[in-house]
Image (cartoon, grey):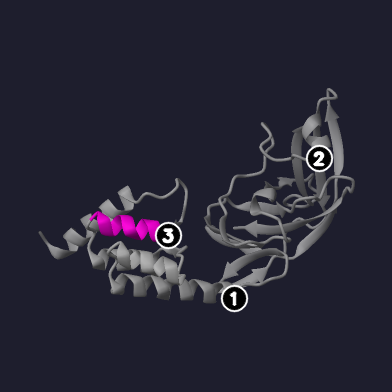
Amino acid sequence: MVPQLSRALTLFVVFTFLPVDQGAESLTNENVVSMVQAKATEDSIVELIENATPSFDTSGQALLELHRAGVSQRIIAAMLLAARRAALALTSLPDEVGVYVKREGHHVRVEPERVEWSEEWFRWSRARLYTRVADPRSQMSVVSPVEFLIVCPIGGSAAEYGLLRAEDGEPRSGAPRASFRVFSIELNQQRLLSGRLWNDSQKSPLAFKAERLSPRKYWIRDLELEEGEYAFLPPGQLLGNKQAQLYTFRVF
């Protein structure tokens, strides 16, 4: 068999039968041991380590257990190098709470816009919260697919953020497009009173997948969005205070 084809088939088997949690993006010590026990080649394991997101335990006890499980010194060295690179990358990430877009290898802050919510009720059971943003275009422009970094407050999670898409506002006389942006959320009375805004049936925020990098930092990569105006809504913005902030951006 051609060597390149053989390596490709080996990697296919590794990726297909790697015992990780569904949806997980990181590689652990247990994954490496499983590949070694499955007789995957050393070259293929090292290549996978170099290209995956590492989540290795590199403590002395963990390294001893890897050695006892038959993991070679070359593979352990690759794991240590990947862990050091990941730690170095984390130290270069911003710490200030906010939303950042990755542009040319740097994280650029998405500046928040202050908004004020209004509400409309439908049959006393459902409500529509909406806000009009005076400027018809966001200052931040990105190209899809886009990568974001969300830095949460202490104890927060990216799952508490909502991704909204704007509707065009009513055009001014003579204006070729909308005169302002309208962001809205539809939810039932129970959700409005409890503050549980997400996972509502109709006007839910757009879905996105965030990978946890550290207790406060989450990475959203390769987010495919159609052309338009969008905003991330941080948690705790609506209850008891109609004033809020949106991290707005435009996709073109």
Marking on residue 129: 2
Identity of the amino acid at label 1?
Thr
Start-end of magenta stretch: 27-38
C-alpha span from label 1 to label 2:
38 Å
Counting other residues with Cα less than 10 Å from the Cα at mark 1, is it few (<14), some (14-19), or many (20 or more)?
few
User: Which of the two residues, 20 or 30, is positioned nearer the viewer here?
Assistant: 30
Residue 132: % across, % down = 82, 49
Residue 153: % across, % down = 73, 61
Q: Nearer the viewer, mark 3 or mark 1?
A: 3
The numbered mark, 3 or 1, whose residue comes first in the sequence reads 3
- Residue in view at x 15 percent, y 64 percent: 3
Identity of the amino acid at label 3?
Thr
Q: Is residue 10 visible?
A: yes
- Residue in view at x 79 percent, y 58 percent: 135
Which quadrant holds the N terminus? bottom left
Identity of the amino acid at label 2?
Leu
Considering the whole magenta stretch, tell me its main secondary structure: helix
Residue 47 falls in image quadrant: bottom left
Left or right, residue 76 beside residue 3? right
Check if mark 3's residue and mark 2's residue have beta carbons within 8 Å. no
Left or right, residue 19 beside residue 221? left
Location of mark 1 (residue): 91
- The relative height of residue 119 versus residue 156 in the rendered view (above or below) is above
Q: Nearer the viewer, mark 3 or mark 2?
A: 3
Marking on residue 198: none
C-alpha span from label 3 to label 2:
43 Å
Location of mark 3 (residue): 28
Residue 104: % across, % down = 54, 74
Residue 210: % across, % down = 57, 54
- The relative height of residue 219 versus residue 104 in the rendered view (above or below) is above
Counting other residues with Cα less than 10 Å from the Cα at mark 2, is it few (<14), some (14-19), or many (20 or more)?
some
Q: Nearer the viewer, mark 1 or mark 2?
A: 1
